[in-house]
């Protein structure tokens, strides 16, 4: 008999949101997972992690029953005993009620993020938050800085259609490694190379898999991208490679920009970036002379204290040359506004109280250890409900995060698929479904398709979906919002209808809805997103965040990063590992085997000075902490730069201290954001 193939969509925290074809072997088991061949973006391609999803779906380590902690925090499964679902939910509800009675409702902090990108299963936690007046969450761990930078110039979160890369003559991948993190993008890069012999340039601090495939790799110091972009603009204006007619019509103040960059030449940028001035000249000339130039702006280079300013500077380039005019030209960062999803029903927007405090998710360590700067005038957090995230591993300043979770007076319920480092800190652990075991719908950041999916197989053991858990708790807490009494399918259907899209049934039957605007609209031929219709070279940072005055309005390098010094002579990039996705897939044997162990990439010259050999144990540290990893000598980065690809679980490191013990929770400018790639460290033999 032929295999049964079922449509689905990848829910993981990646711009691709791949359309999937899943082999269903029976009502409980899947086989191979493939990219949907008929989807014009996914184009039959899917990353290796998801292709072998059966390894994760049917992993023996999945949580099967609710658990109550009976031993010490942080030990893992041995510290837990099974508990019935009703008893577990009753206990969670009672503890949330008790916390609110003792300290006020803001003492409860529902905490979530993007372990699933499905709009119902991810965001329904807000409905509970809003009705119960629990503390809000300021989302800063992923796109706060990149959003701010793109928004400052473009004025909306959308851009050129990535499928138009096939018409490009030059593709610049700036601050991303799609070979590892967004493999579908490389399909469209390859098509452009075949169709038009397009050149590919990668801007990245180290020689990634994507950089290896490029025609040109500009290897720069972390956090210096704005200097490179500004020096390129210097060359473009100097050599007459700008489109003055386009700038006059579509930009706010090209004269001020030209005057501003006049003194910032490639030699100025070389001193900051480490990229030779001649290479900057060559890149700028290549970019300026290629009308159909497409920049894919990544997320990585924005995860720095000056990341928003860097993203804005890079986004200025196609406005200077007028590349937006041409099919195959312009830039893409993310698509969000094109979907015009009204999620009010899902999140309970009608119940949101703006006077309730919002706590910064990236500063969870400071929040849980009671820093007044973070708590404001409100009470300490004494109860948490956590879904879709693993903060003990993924959040910066992780030793402080751990300290906060170890508090005896903090009650924590974690709803998870595996016994993560965070779940091991919980009082109650609830088993969660995977995306293959529940309904949901998805919009994409990296393309234009809206997808509706149904469960492919039955839930594993006693696992329940996020929606089921939120609704069960809501009923115990006396919530009345109608969203708690609707099925997931009903929520999807009504949300789609009020957002102007076809019904849930209709979209599921056709698998996806292409929400792309016309090519001209995607390239802002009718004007950019700001009220004046212009691209803004002059960023109004103060309108974006309270620290806006610390940044130059015109694009520039902001020297606010954690600079290397005599005591901390290396700049660390904590880059994503190819076989993991944040802390997801770290439990699967194939991913573990291919990544081998936590490793630091260090330049051979630096290793020689430190008397280090390949494979040596190395201690890496700063003012916050130190960790032990193994050295790998690697000439694909600058001397003075080191890379630790992760995110391995903390217990995979010697001493149980992971890489985010080194990263700072200091918020990026101007409105917060995690600065994972902005860390000065020392390195020595362990």
Image (spheres, rainbow, N blue to C red):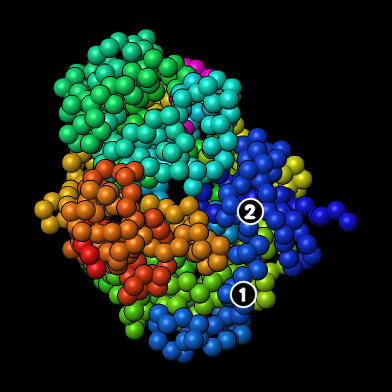
Q: In the picture shown, does residue 195 fall above or below 446?
A: above
Q: Is residue 328 within the magenta segment?
A: yes
> Toward which corner of the image does residue 685 lie, by quadrant?
bottom left
Q: Position of residue 159 (x, y in %)?
A: 48, 31
Spatial CA distance of label 1 from label 2 is 19 Å
Q: In the picture shown, does residue 614 fall above or below 459?
A: above
Q: Is residue 583 within the magenta segment?
A: no
Image quadrant containing the N terminus? bottom right
Please name the residue that numbered disc 2 is placed on: 51
Q: Position of residue 81 (x, y in %)?
A: 54, 88
Q: Which residues are magenta?
A: 325-332
Residue at image coords 51%, 38%: 335
Circle 1 crowding by C-alpha within 10 Å: few under 14, some 14–19, many from 20: few
Question: Upstream in the sequence, badge 1 or badge 2?
Answer: 2
* Residue 525 visible in the snapshot: no
Q: Residue furthest left?
A: 566
Give whichever of 365, 303 is nearer the camera: 303
> Toward which corner of the image does residue 285 lie, by quadrant?
top left
Please name the residue that numbered disc 1 is placed on: 60
Q: Is residue 538 left or right of residue 64?
A: left
């Amino acid at each position: 008999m032929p295999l049964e193939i079922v449509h689905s969509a990848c829910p993981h925290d990646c711009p691709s949101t791949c359309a999937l074809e899943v082999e269903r072997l029976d009502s409980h088991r899947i086989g191979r997972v493939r990219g949907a061949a008929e989807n014009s973006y996914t184009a039959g391609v899917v990353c290796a992690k998801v292709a072998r999803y059966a390894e994760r779906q049917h992993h023996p380590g999945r949580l099967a029953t609710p658990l109550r902690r009976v031993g010490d925090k942080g030990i893992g499964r041995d510290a837990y005993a099974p508990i019935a679902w009703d008893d577990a939910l009753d206990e969670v509800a009672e503890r949330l009620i008790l916390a609110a009675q003792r300290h006020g409702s803001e003492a409860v902090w529902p905490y979530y993020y993007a372990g699933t990108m499905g709009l119902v299963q991810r965001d329904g936690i807000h409905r509970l938050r809003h009705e119960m007046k629990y503390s809000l969450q300021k989302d800063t761990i992923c796109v706060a800085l990149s959003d701010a930078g793109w928004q400052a110039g473009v004025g909306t979160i959308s851009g050129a259609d990535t499928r138009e890369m096939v018409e490009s003559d030059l593709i610049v991948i700036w601050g991303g490694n799609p070979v590892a993190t967004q493999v579908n993008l490389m399909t469209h890069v390859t098509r452009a190379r075949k169709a038009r012999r397009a050149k590919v340039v990668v801007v990245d601090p180290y020689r990634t898999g994507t950089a290896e495939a490029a025609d040109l790799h500009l290897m720069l110091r972390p956090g210096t991208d704005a200097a490179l972009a500004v020096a390129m603009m210097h060359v473009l204006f100097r050599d007459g490679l700008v489109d003055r007619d386009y700038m006059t019509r579509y930009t706010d103040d090209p004269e001020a920009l030209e005057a501003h960059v006049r003194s910032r030449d490639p030699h100025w940028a070389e001193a900051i970036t480490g990229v030779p001035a001649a290479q900057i000249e060559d890149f700028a000339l290549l970019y300026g002379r290629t009308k159909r130039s497409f920049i894919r702006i990544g997320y990585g280079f924005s995860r720095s204290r000056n990341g928003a300013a860097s993203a804005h500077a890079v986004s200025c380039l196609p406005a200077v040359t007028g590349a937006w005019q041409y099919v195959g030209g312009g830039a893409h960062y993310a698509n969000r506004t094109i979907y015009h999803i009204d999620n009010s029903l899902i999140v309970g927007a009608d119940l949101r109280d703006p006077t309730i405090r919002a706590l910064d998710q990236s500063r969870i360590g400071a929040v849980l250890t009671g820093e007044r700067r973070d708590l404001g005038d409100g009470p300490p957090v004494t109860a948490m409900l956590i879904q879709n995230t693993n903060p003990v591993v993924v959040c910066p300043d992780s030793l402080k995060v751990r300290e906060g979770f170890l508090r005896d007076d903090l009650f924590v319920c974690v709803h998870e698929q595996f016994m993560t480092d965070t779940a091991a800190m919980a009082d109650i652990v609830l088993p969660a479904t995977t995306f293959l075991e529940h309904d949901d719908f998805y919009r994409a950041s990296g393309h234009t398709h809206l997808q509706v999916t149904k469960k492919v197989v039955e839930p594993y053991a006693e696992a329940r979906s996020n929606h089921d858990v939120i609704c069960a708790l809501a009923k115990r807490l006396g919530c009345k919002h109608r969203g708690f009494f609707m099925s997931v399918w009903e929520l999807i259907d009504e949300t789609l209808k009020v957002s102007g899209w076809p019904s849930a049934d209709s979209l599921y039957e056709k698998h996806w809805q292409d929400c792309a605007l016309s090519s001209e609209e995607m390239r802002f031929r009718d004007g950019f997103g700001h009220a004046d219709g212009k691209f803004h070279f002059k960023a109004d940072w103060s309108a974006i965040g309270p620290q806006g005055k610390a940044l130059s309005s015109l694009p520039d390098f902001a020297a606010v990063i954690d600079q290397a010094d005599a005591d901390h002579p290396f700049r660390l990039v904590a880059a994503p590992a190819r076989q993991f996705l944040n802390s997801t897939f770290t439990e699967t044997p194939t991913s573990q085997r291919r990544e081998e162990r936590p490793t630091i990439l260090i330049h051979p010259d630096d290793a020689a000075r430190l008397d280090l050999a390949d494979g040596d144990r190395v201690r890496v540290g700063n003012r916050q902490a130190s960790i032990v990893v193994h050295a790998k000598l690697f000439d694909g980065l600058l001397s003075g730069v080191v890379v630790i690809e992760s995110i391995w679980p903390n217990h995979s490191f010697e001493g149980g201290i992971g890489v985010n013990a080194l990263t700072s929770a200091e918020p990026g400018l101007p409105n917060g954001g995690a600065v994972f790639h902005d860390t000065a460290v020392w390195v020595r033999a362990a």
